[in-house]
Image: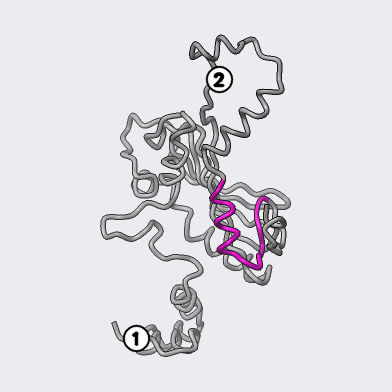
């Protein structure tokens, strides 16, 4: 579809590393909705021998699509593998606590009690080619990993839509996708609140990594000076 639309894209495993028109590419991806999936399914089923005849369908007997496993993801592509690995290592160190019940409640927006099934802990899986951090909620989980040594991917895997209060019918795909995204906290911020990739967040992260603060300490004045330099433009007073 991207090629047919005249877009030049750089491939990434299960995604795109770059595109000549990212907004247009996003609109193309957003076209994958329940209606299109149903049309695709019906087209394939019309070619297969089925035990149900046209009279059965006319009487209301037919197949119904349901969601067994749905994955939503957000991928952040960095320009240098070294930066990607450094950032990923910091994410691992800073997110090993996400599996705790109080954090699961904020992220999934679901009440966690002693009767809630599942083990609330964070698992760090290390393989020769990949390190993945996982934490679970009931039958679903979120995993963070480094893709192709250059992209950070945060992936929500929903194995039972009921975990997020959704029905299994394909008609509820949009609702499930919305709930699988970061949840708003009480003060209106997403969890986690700092948006990776935001210029001000990146400037703050770079400033806090400055080793000079280990000697001089951090003050509002010195932190603003470093952030202003990293942003390239003065920060407004807020």
Where 202 falls versus 141 (above or below)? below
Q: Select label 1 or label 2 by which is in front.
A: 2
Extreme residue toward the left, this view: 186
- In the image, taking residue 64 as reference, residue 17 lies left or right, namely right
> In which quadrant will I find the C terminus?
bottom left
The residue carrying pointer 2 sits among few (fewer than 14), some (14 to 19) or many (20 or more) residues within 10 Å by Cα, namely: few
Distance Cα–Cα, label 1 vs label 2: 58 Å
**x and y percentages locating residue 117 in the rendered image:** 41, 30
Residue 63: mark: 2
**x and y percentages locating residue 210 in the rendered image:** 50, 82
Determine the residue positioned at 31% across, 55% down.
185
- Taking the magenta stretch, the answer to whether it contains residue 27 is yes
Determine the residue positioned at 61% across, 27% down.
42
Where 91 falls versus 32 (above or below)? below
- In the image, taking residue 116 as reference, residue 94 lies left or right, namely right
- Taking the magenta stretch, the answer to whether it contains residue 65 is no
Region rendered in magenta: 14-31
Q: Secondary structure at mark 2?
A: loop
Q: Nearer the viewer, residue 78 or 103?
A: 78
Where 167 falls versus 190 (above or below)? above
Residue 160: mark: none
Determine the residue positioned at 37% across, 34% down.
165
**x and y percentages locating residue 97 in the rendered image:** 44, 52
Q: Nearer the viewer, residue 129 or 167?
A: 167
Question: Where, by quadrant of the figure, is residue 138 drawn?
Answer: top left
**Residue wearing tag 1:** 236
Q: Secondary structure at mark 1?
A: loop
Q: Nearer the viewer, residue 56 or 189?
A: 56
- Sequence-first disc among 1 and 2: 2
């Amino acid at each position: 579809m991207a090629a047919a639309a005249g877009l030049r894209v750089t491939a990434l495993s299960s995604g795109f590393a770059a595109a000549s028109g990212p907004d247009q590419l996003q609109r193309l991806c957003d076209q994958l909705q329940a209606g299109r999936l149903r049309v695709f399914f019906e087209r394939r089923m019309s070619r297969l021998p089925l035990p149900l005849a046209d009279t059965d369908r006319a009487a209301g007997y037919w197949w119904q699509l349901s969601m067994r496993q749905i994955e939503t993801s957000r991928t952040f592509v960095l320009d240098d593998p070294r930066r990607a690995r450094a950032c990923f290592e910091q994410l691992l160190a800073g997110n090993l606590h996400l599996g705790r019940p109080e954090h699961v409640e904020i992220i999934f927006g679901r009440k966690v009690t002693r009767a809630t099934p599942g083990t609330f802990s964070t698992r760090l899986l290390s393989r020769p080619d990949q390190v993945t951090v996982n934490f679970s909620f009931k039958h679903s989980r979120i995993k963070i990993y480094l893709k192709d040594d250059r992209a950070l991917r945060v992936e929500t895997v929903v194995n039972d839509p009921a975990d997020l209060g959704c029905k299994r019918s394909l008609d509820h795909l949009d609702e499930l996708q919305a709930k699988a995204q970061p949840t708003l906290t009480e003060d209106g911020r997403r969890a986690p609140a700092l948006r990776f990739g935001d210029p001000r967040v990146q400037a703050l992260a770079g400033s806090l990594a400055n080793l000079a603060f280990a000697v001089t300490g951090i003050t509002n004045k010195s932190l603003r000076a470093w952030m202003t330099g990293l942003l390239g433009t003065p920060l407004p007073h807020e």
